[in-house]
Amino acid sequence: MNLDDYLITEEPYYSPTHNEIQLFEAAYANRMPMMLKGPTGCGKTRFVEYIAWKLKKPLITVSCHEDMTASDLVGRYLLDAEGTVWHDGPLTLAVRHGAICYLDEIVEARQDTSVVIHSLTDDRRILSLEKKNEVIKANKDFQIVISYNPGYQSVLKDLKESTKQRFGAIDFDYPKAEDEAKIIAHESGIDTKTAAKLVQISERSRNLKGHGLDEGASTRMLIYAAQLMSKGIPLEEACEVALVLPITDDLDIRNALSSAIEACA
Amino acid sequence: MAASTTRGKYVISSHSQEPAQEPGDPDERLVFLINEGKHLFPNEYYPLWETACGKLSHAGYGALIPLSYARHSPKLVKILNSETAINFAATVSLAAIKVNRAAAELLPKAAVIAAHELKSTQAFTSWVTTIEELIYNAPESLLAVLERTQKIVSTLTPDQFRTWVLTGLRSTGDDALRQINYFSFTDPESEKWFRHEAGDVVFTDLDRRLKLYLLSLWSLRPPIRDLPASTSPLSLRRISISNGVVRVPEVFPGFHGEQAEKIFRAGLAHVGAHLVYSTKIFPLGELKPIQVALVSLLEDARVEYLAIQTFPGLRKLWQQFHVAKPSGPKLVPLLLSRLARALIDKEYKDKDGWVQKGRDMFFDPQNDMTDPAMCRSIGVLLGNDLGQLRAQFNAKTYVVEPAYRDDNMGLWDFGDQQGQEEDSDGIFIEAMRMDREEVEDDSSSEQEQDQKENDEDEQQYHARESTDSEQRESEVAVRYPEYDYLTGSERPNWTCVLEYFPDFGDAYKIERILEKHNNLVNRITKLIQTAKVSLPERLHRQSVGESLDLDACVNAVISRRMGDTPDPRIYSTTERKHRDLSVMVLLDISNSTNDKVQVSGTSVLELEIQATSLLAYAMSELNDPFAISAFCSDGKEDVHYYRIKDFNSPYDTRARAHLAGLHGKLSTRMGAAMRHATEDLVAQRTHRRLLLVISDGEPSDIDVDDQQYLVEDARKVVRSISRLGIDTFCVGLDAGGDNYLHKIFGRKNVAVIDKLEHLPEKLPLLYLRLTA
């Protein structure tokens, strides 16, 4: 089967914060399973896309949800008019044909899913399809990447120790102020001075982390705000829509944030 | 004596256009006034009014009260109606009996003022009702209130007036002297609540959002307090920073609604700028008062300049309060305001040479804006210039303008020169020092007090971080609102919960309890273990269930087609599998818990400790997150709160020793303690959260007479907690307070036990509530 549809043809914009690209390339050379940690909206998914483009490998992304089972990943028999047909799941697809398989927010999925990947994440690199009575040896291009938000999940939803220890990890955080401004400017088309102002605003919201906010405003949020501004929406309003209102329902925090935004404007 | 005025003797005066001369003799005057009334009252009401006047004059209140009534009450007819005017006599009579003649005499006059303002009969009647409440509850204060009728009725609606009066009665208890202080506005609390009722924005309303604002801008979390009462008039109070503590006046008079919020915000942003950029303290040295004022002004401008570099939006926020005009007499305070404006407002033009010079010197590109020293050198020069202009500067009356700026006392090092200022220049310093003392506290040992307050602030600042601060008496002080059922609203910041460090007892006592009740412990542990409190989980591939599992069905069909035996487990069902529950156990340790329980013969507190130790053992065995706290109270300003075990600390010997060390004392202000306990519970991220109150009954406190008040407050807390998704349950010990507990928690949420052995029987009730 051809995975051309999964190839990323255009270079996604990614601005490295440290040496993560180099690290990841080294890991890929050994097909080491990787774990990307970091708060929401800091660029994990974008990073994977960029890497897949750079390595010219197809990328299969699976967003995990709490009702997802192992067969959603591996595949299942389906019924059709003639009889039963086996249908490969996204993971099997990647294993068979050689792709980077990115499991986004893996802790959200049911526990049995994380066990399925165990045999793929050690030196065996095999996937056994019990129902089909088949064992697939992983394609040489196959690599597994998962993302993981520590602290943001409850204790109940944590990765098993045996799963955690199968991965190398790269820690992501929001980029440095000037880098973040550059990213925002690039993604939205606004000038860097305005973008820098947005970064300054995000700093204000990140100060409130732990005092009523679970997370400060993410880079993604700032890009949204900037995109609104590029269409002529004034700063305060754009931030209200893209940043203040989504992030909290607490009126006092909203008020404090809006006033802080006014101060930055 | 007025007693001689009987009906029939009145001489009906002729219908002359000119008002007739009032006779000098009180009796005759009354007769005259009653005659006058005839023109004012409609025919059918006149005899009634006449009777009312007669009653007052026969009652032996003296001559003045009936005179006052006869003179003023006819005016009510015009504004309101005859009936109200006549019925009002009863209130006057009540005041005469319960209060004194002076108040009763003033009452009709005040009523006319009130009627003029209120205009409607309904509003007037409710004003009278509140006056009557005052007569019953605080007779000594009636006169003070009546004297201020104009101020009160022109600002507050009758409902707000009533709320303000009730607030006064609640906060002063039965103490007549404190009541008089409150109702004569001597007590600053009074003005605060008055403003609050009038709908003015008081700092209390904005407290949280402004703190978040500072945190958001600069990551600053300075302790912020109300400005304590001082003799300086309200309108002259300014924000003050000393030793890192920020004191904010409750109100900025003259600023309403949005403007008020803005000036508080501007003020705190200014404080933030000081805290970030005012890195050095100026030594006072030989500076003259005008120079001190100028250096302070320049320093204000400097920190604002720096803050605006980072946050340009702040310019707009601050600038709107600079309203000085470039004209007018060259008085020093006006010149200072003009200079202040010139330093922040780029557009502002001022032809005055001195202001221009100040501006030029300040914005000289040679200046290092980050160095406070520049303010000192410029301030000294500008001060000398003013001196040469022979402009008069009165340090005693000088107040920093605009109002959002702080008094700048925190910028100066006054050294230790107390009592050395003999020369005339020292007056300002002296004045400032006086101000400062007033601001600090009116305690005699200022320094000691200062030190202590600092400590407290420190502690509050570091709130929970300090775990090994065993020596400290009170680690945290937090204020909470309280609900008053009479007004149907919460009074903000009404009570103060102080956290005290719990005593140590004998930890083995707890062990012994567990040993003694070995089988109970097992039963309870099992019981809790079987309680599943979590989100229902969907279970697939079940042989029994309420819906078909589609995946399983497809698989079964596939198996059949492939010739295998299909798996018969094709149903799915939902089930609660875990216990995802945090429990906060809140123990009432008021004095009444020392009473013996009839049935078991142990004290209530003993029973509480026993029950808690069993529960705690079970929960810690099962790894359920739980916390234990205890409370008692000594008036609204001192609600004691003891943390026995926190959610994130282990249930170890230390926690057990604290539990064993509890002893019953003081009173039961349940609502405040529950509010405080909830703060911890809210942070817990479990599916269900439970506040488990163990109490012996009725909430009460030494400063509350009204039994229903604290019950209603606690009830309100339970309701508002449930809105946060937190369950409350109460274990009542002994049947005494049964009814109150039912009222507070709801009948289904109370289990009453009088013997430890009954605990396992009642516990299922609790878990049933949670899983239902």
Image: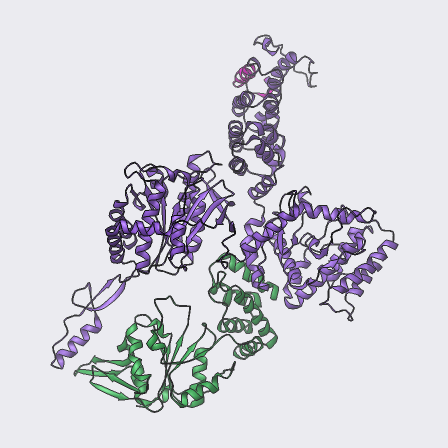
Chain colours: A green, B purple
Whole-percent x, y for residue B509 in the image: 34, 49
Q: Is residue B381 above or below residue B644?
A: below
Q: Is residue B375 above or below residue B719?
A: below
Q: Magenta: predominant secondary structure element?
A: helix
Give the camera-side residue of B580 and A141: B580
Q: Which residue is painted at 21% across and 71% down in the image?
A: B550
Q: Is residue B575 left or right of residue B209?
A: left
Q: Quadrant of the N terminus of chain B?
A: top right
As for residue A1 lying within the magenta part, the answer is no
Q: Which residue is painted at 65% across and 58% down in the image?
A: B270
Q: Which residue is painted at 35% across and 71% down in the image?
A: A108
Residue B176 in view: yes
Q: How many marks?
A: 0
Whole-percent x, y for residue B600 in the image: 28, 39
Q: Is residue A196 left or right of residue A249?
A: right
Give the camera-side residue of A71 and B79: A71
Q: Is residue B138 left or right of residue A126?
A: right
Residues rendered magenta in the picture: B38-55
